[in-house]
Image (cartoon, coloured by chain):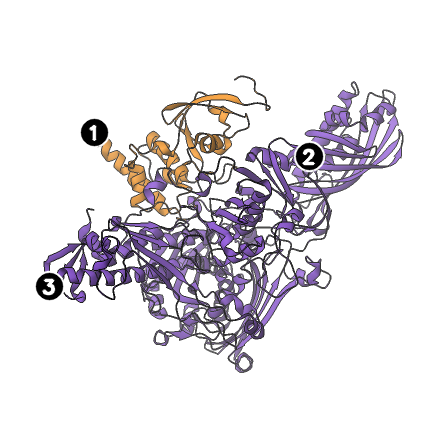
Amino acid sequence: MTILEKTESLVGRTVERIEDAGLLTGRGRYIDDLPVRQDTAHLAILRSPHGHAEIRTIDTTAALALPGVFAVLTGEDVARLTRSMTVGVKANVECWPMARDRVRYVGEPVALVVAENRYVAEDALDLIEVEYETLAAVIDPEKALAANAPVLHPSLETNLINERSFRYGDPEAAFEAAAHRISIRIAYPRNSCTPIETYGVIAEYDPGEDAYDVTANFQGPFSIHAVISRALNVPGNRMRLRTPPDSGGSFGIKQGVFPYVILAAVAARVAGRPVKWIEDRLEHLTASVSATNRVTTLEAAVTANGRITALSWDQLEDCGAHLRAPEPATLYRMHGNMTGAYAIENVAIRNRVVLTNKTPTGLNRGFGGPQIYLALERLVHKIADELGLDRLDVIRRNLVPADAFPYRTATGGLLDSGDYQAALDRACAEGGLEALRQRRDSARAEGRLYGIGYAAVVEPSVSNMGYITTVLTPDERAKAGPKNGAQAVATVAIDPLGSVTVKVASVPQGQGHRTVLAQVVAERLGLPMQAVYVNTELDTSRDAWSIASGNYASRFAPAVAGAAALAADRIRRRLAAIAAGQLNVTADRVDFKAGKLVDRDNPDNAVSFGRVAAASHWAPGTLPDGTDQTIRETVFWTPEQLQAPTAADGINSSLCHGFIFDFCGVEIDRATGQVRIDSYVTMHDCGRILHPGMVEGQVRGGFAQAVGAALYEEYAYGSDGSFLTGTLADYLIPTVMETPEPVILHHETPSPFTPLGAKGVGEGNCMSTPVCIANAVADALGVEDIRLPLSPSRVSEWLYGEERPPSKPQNAIPVATGASGQRMLTGSGSADVAATRGAVWAMLLDPNTLKAIIPGAHEVRKVTDTHFRAEVTLGIGPVKGRYRADIRLSDMVEPEAVTLSGGTEGALGSGRGMGRITLADTATGTRIAYRYEAAIGGKVASVGGRLLDGAARVVIGQFFQALARHAGGGTPRSVGFLQRLSALFRRRR
Amino acid sequence: MPRMNAARKHPVEFTLNGRTVRAEVENRMLLSDLLRHEIGLTGTHVGCEHGVCGACTVQIDGRPARACLTLAQQVRGSDVRTVEALAPDPAVLSPLQAAFRRHHGLQCGFCTPGILMSLDALLRERPDADREDIREHLSGHLCRCTGYATIVEAALAAAEEQRKEETTNA
């Protein structure tokens, strides 16, 4: 209590965080750290290795028989105890947390095991046998719309799950009258902010009350609670959802844990004991949520001097294999601010949502922002270039004027406050734009590739819970009833000793909410910060909450901290009334200072805070008439500006709108294509700043993730649906070495709509930075068709064109890319073995011999005389995995020839192939000749062809060496045929 | 090292944060799992289990190591230190920890224990570590919250403080 003298100006100061001492000493309490009941079992999930396949059979017998296994559930088992998850649009589809008859993305849950520990649970996964019939997959959202595209959901008869068109103002007339029509077509890739802590769930079921009790590192929005309760078929009060005290980051992603809440809850019910699941990183990369990928065509009607009079958006949103709540929210979150920072009166929008064989999408920092600004801010650059105008002038000319706030956008948004021109001018002056231009000019004079990019964006925060209903038609909305608002909740409580506790439903994921709330409430009550205790754990059975609760849409500072201030003010007014009687003054003369309530005009006339605060507990009869208790005050605050969509589809999708203006200089290495960010300036108007250190932390953190999205990160898929970035060695997150230091500037215009004048700040750079860097790279290279991420290989293509095949063909086994992204392997060879044909024949049909000679084989089982199953572990290059092979023999001419055909699959890929083996007598024994053709898909197919072929030859060679040894000597001539064949089947991962 | 088999548990004994610990573990058990789930020291976090993110970094015989890539049996007889050992007293932060708090070198705190263990080893071995040394050592860690700048500043401040203290003590 040493900083009493500072208590009056706590808000706005960079105080040390309350959270840090525990986190720095290993005393954080993340979900995997929490104590659990002693009989808690562990859950592991078997996931689809295919992007698209029918599930023929699932055999769980062996898994169930493994000691330590309590339960094994398939999709049908889960479906029996649940209902399909709610889908946010009117469409004839179901949405299950575990696949039933068909898998639609790599990583989709297919079965789960509950066992005594994670090790045993994962052992049991290996014992589940699933037969798939693979289907053609569709990955590209545009191809998914083609008439002959594979349809993911037969009940829907198409992959286009939703389409809506909107019209605001008179866009047709504006385009008709325009001096220029300029358009751009651009695709935003899939990426994810990938928190370092993965998903986690602990679930329990009480059969007596038919009630679930689940702890999950879920981040909200708690509208999802309704989805979970419905899916579990219980009333909301039988679905207790709690969050742990600490969470290891989220950035939107942990919204996507909810299907696993359902799975773990059902698993606990079936297993009859609590169940715990901690996702691993490979699961997270493959199957947790990400940003949507989107293909956008954006056209502008432009006057001769660069003023934009209309925009026409055509957005094709790819939400993956299922439309999972709250999607298609990514597409509608920005609906009120589709004109960005600009005053554009006329807007046409066509929004289409398509399903593809990729993981379902969800919340990701920036939510919808990076997708629209990549198109809008690239287009503004292009408009300036085509008209021969200065790019910055075009931005300036179109900005919403400073005297227009609050400004109603064409699409219904209400921009709360700002002075965009002043912020931009200050950024240019204080950020050193002129010096940067000179730097560019001198670099170019030396022949270097250097470019400057700009981006001006509006950063929305505090989402209107009704914006997603813009996806419904006005008629559908009228039937469903209006949805709007965004309830923020905060409670201030005083205990019998007069100390203050704050409780909010904000579910922080590392931002420091506890610290800011202590600042806000302590300041209002005249207490030192340390005197206020803040609890941010949420328990839906005990705490005040609503659907908007949670940590998303940058709502903490503007909404939750504001609600806490309002609750503290209510308590303060009552305390003043109580103290007034004791001090014998009027309530308006009572000041709150340094732990005392004092007479403003006579500071000696004072009473301690604790004494007044405790009166409601110990002597409620002494409270003045008309003054309510001060024990606990809960405020629900929802801003009136957040109205439901209008009949004309106008929607104020967010309460606050920060402004960001960024510019940067990049240099591109001509030899390697690497993009280096030379300088980055980011100007923010986030309203009133409550804690400058945390605001800077939010800006820097968002910026670093945006650098990743711009330069390195993509959830990449092969065209057969295989997932190509399944480890952190493939999905490249910037380290300290790749993260430059931005110059951060602020221009504060407090929001008139929030209690503290604050706006959100957490997501802005995820919206502005990718396009700012893209614009700079476009400037450096003079390339219009920019695609993210701007990896060296992609940039090199723009520099040098696509890599050509070597002029001299190599003598390698022919390798060609097969249909639908598969890699074809073909080859032939022979080997000599010192055994008779009959003996070799017998060996090749004997599982025990095969097990001994197949490289990496754990088990070879003879299903019938002509059908074998094998389990093998093989590594090719960096990719080591376990595969299950299914081999059938046909066209058998004993002991001369046999055809092997079959398939293999594992987490890292799959393959199908066929090979013919012939046996011929030689002087010393038998010559085995073979021919094979195999198609390999999945992650393994992304391994370089030379490596794949080389590895294939090595494995085949090992097989024949082993066969020769087994046959009692002899020399394999080249690569064994049968071995290769069987090895190949195994190898086609 | 004695021959082990997968069918049963085997004893392992080592020094953990200055105290001898004994445990019976399967030979496949990871050090990270032993620390967290058998011994109950949950300060060491698991972020990727394939050695990239660095969250699980501990010190084995003074050197930073990934606990998720280390089998529990490999630390037989070793001296293992985790984040729980850094503070001189439960209520007092070490200079490095205090610098992280002062400079906002953490947000969610999940990657922080591993980063602290790497930096603690670096500053012990190389008290003169400069910005580039620190950045290089941090490059084995992923942080998604901070953008790293405040971590570097915290480490530089801690190094500076350590040097001052040594000059004062000398």
Q: Contact, CB < 8 Å: mark 2 with mark 1?
A: no
Q: Which chain is orange?
A: B
User: Circle 1 — which element?
Assistant: helix
Task: Report in which chain the residue with disc 1 lies.
Answer: B
At x 88%, y 28%, the residue is A920
Query: As drawn, is A157 to the left or to the right of A587?
Result: right
Q: Amino acid at mark 3?
A: Asp
Q: Position of residue A264 (x, y in %)?
A: 56, 45
- Give the labeled residue for mark 2: A62
Query: As drawn, is B154 to the left or to the right of A506?
Result: left
- Give the labeled residue for mark 3: A601
Q: Name the mark nearer the viewer: 2 or 1.
A: 2
Q: Is residue A872 above or below residue A463?
A: above
Callout 2: few (<14), some (14-19), or many (20+) C-alpha neighbours within 10 Å?
A: few
Callout 3: few (<14), some (14-19), or many (20+) C-alpha neighbours within 10 Å?
A: few
Q: Amino acid at mark 2?
A: Ala
Task: Report in which chain the residue with disc 2 lies.
Answer: A
Callouts 3 and 2 in the same chain: yes
- Give the labeled residue for mark 1: B169
The answer to which image quadrant residue B118 occupies is top left
Q: Which chain is purple?
A: A
Q: Is residue A840 above or below residue A97?
A: above
Q: How many badges with numbers are in the image?
A: 3
The quarter in which the C terminus of chain A is drawn is top right
Q: Contact, CB < 8 Å: mark 3 with mark 2?
A: no
Q: Name the mark nearer the viewer: 3 or 1.
A: 3
Query: As drawn, is A28 to the left or to the right of A160?
Result: left
Q: Position of residue A375 (x, y in %)?
A: 52, 65
Task: Report in which chain the residue with disc 3 lies.
Answer: A
Furthest-right residue in this view: A893
The answer to which image quadrant residue A516 occupies is bottom left
